[in-house]
Amino acid sequence: MILTLSHQKGGVGKSTVAWNLTVNFSKMIPTRIVDLDTQRSLTVTNALRREQGLEAIEMLHFTTAEELAEYAAADSDGVLTIIDSGGFDSAFNRVAIIASDLLITPVSDKPFDLMGLQKYEEILKSLSEIQGETIKTRVLFNNINPSMKRFGELVDFICTSEHFDLLVSVLRQRVDMAHSVGEGKSIKEYRVFSRADQEMDELVEEIKTLLDIK
Ligand SMILES: Nc1ncnc2c1ncn2[C@@H]1O[C@H](COP(=O)(O)OP(=O)(O)OP(=O)(O)O)[C@@H](O)[C@H]1O
Ligand SMILES: [Mg+2]
């Protein structure tokens, strides 16, 4: 099974969410992470994790998009591979999008997020034409002000696009999100039962249903 956190817009939380999902799922089923981010954020996070005396996450690196495509073609149902795609359009990211059983696109409620999603829709549209099937991603509201209740035009856009579906789970803006990653930990390992931890658990449950993970 392949799950990709993908958006050509930077800074939306792809790496943060990919990291937390990988650590949480690794306690349930064999889970690997692929770091396609040129900044290698999660490779650094994994090294920090080792320094904390925690068991490192199994991490894969590919030197070419063809290698990633080969890995994806040999994918098995018993292993979950989570891909942190880079924040731009590249051959690597396109392979990841096509190979995924589930695509998740984090977006915030900041100015330009709607514009970012419209740009990303263009990429999904062109890939769908090449593939001959409609590629869909699940939009995850992330880094949302805790008091924010309505998402207005973003939701309208998501609901009218054939390339987007909205996840029920919402991740609010929580300081633990940045602090935990800075220590190579998931939110749960950093502070269990926090609101951030509960929100991440809800997301994990939603993904388990979507991917039929028991
Ligand atoms: N729910 C959240 N609450 C608070 N801070 C968050 C949350 N999600 C992400 N952040 C912060 O937002 C910033 C961007 O997150 P992250 O690096 O995960 O984004 P990205 O999409 O991977 O960016 P890039 O495209 O540059 O790789 C980081 O400082 C991270 O700590
Ligand atoms: Mg990143």
Image: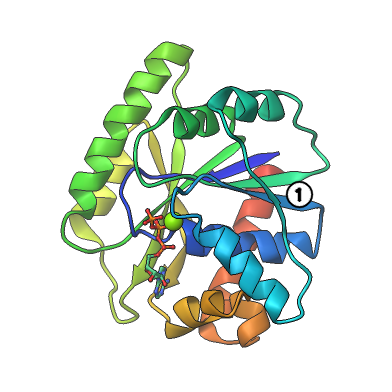
Q: Position of residue 99 (x, y in %)?
A: 59, 29
Label 1 Cα crowd, 10 Å radius (few <14 / some 14-19 / many 20+): some
Task: Tell me: 112 left or right of 24.
Answer: left
- Residue nearest the viewer, comparing 55 with 74: 55
Amino acid type, callout 1: Ile
Task: Note whether residue 202 is visible.
Answer: no
* Residue 6 location, quadrant: top left
Relative to 202, residue 95 above or below:
above
For ligand 1, the image quadrant comes to bottom left
Task: Tell me: 24 left or right of 137.
Answer: right
Q: Quadrant of the N terminus?
A: top right
Task: Tell me: 197 left or right of 154.
Answer: right
Task: Please give the name of the residue rendered at 76% of the width and 26% of the height, measured from the top-left corner.
Answer: 74
Task: Note whether residue 130 is visible.
Answer: yes
Q: Position of residue 186 (x, y in %)?
A: 62, 74
Task: Please give the name of the residue rendered at 47% of the width and 53% of the height, measured from the top-left corner.
Answer: 167
Relative to 191, residue 12 above or below:
above
Task: Please give the name of the residue rendered at 44% of the width and 22% of the height, measured from the top-left corner.
Answer: 134
Q: Residue tagged by mark 1?
A: 213
Q: Position of residue 11 (x, y in %)?
A: 34, 59
What coloring was used for the rendering? Answer: rainbow
Q: Is mark 1 within 8 Å of ligand 1?
A: no
- Residue nearest the viewer, comparing 11 with 37: 37
Relative to 70, residue 169 above or below:
below
- Total numbered labels: 1
Label 1 residue SS: loop
Q: Position of residue 88 (x, y in %)?
A: 34, 41
- Residue nearest the viewer, comparing 43 with 142: 43
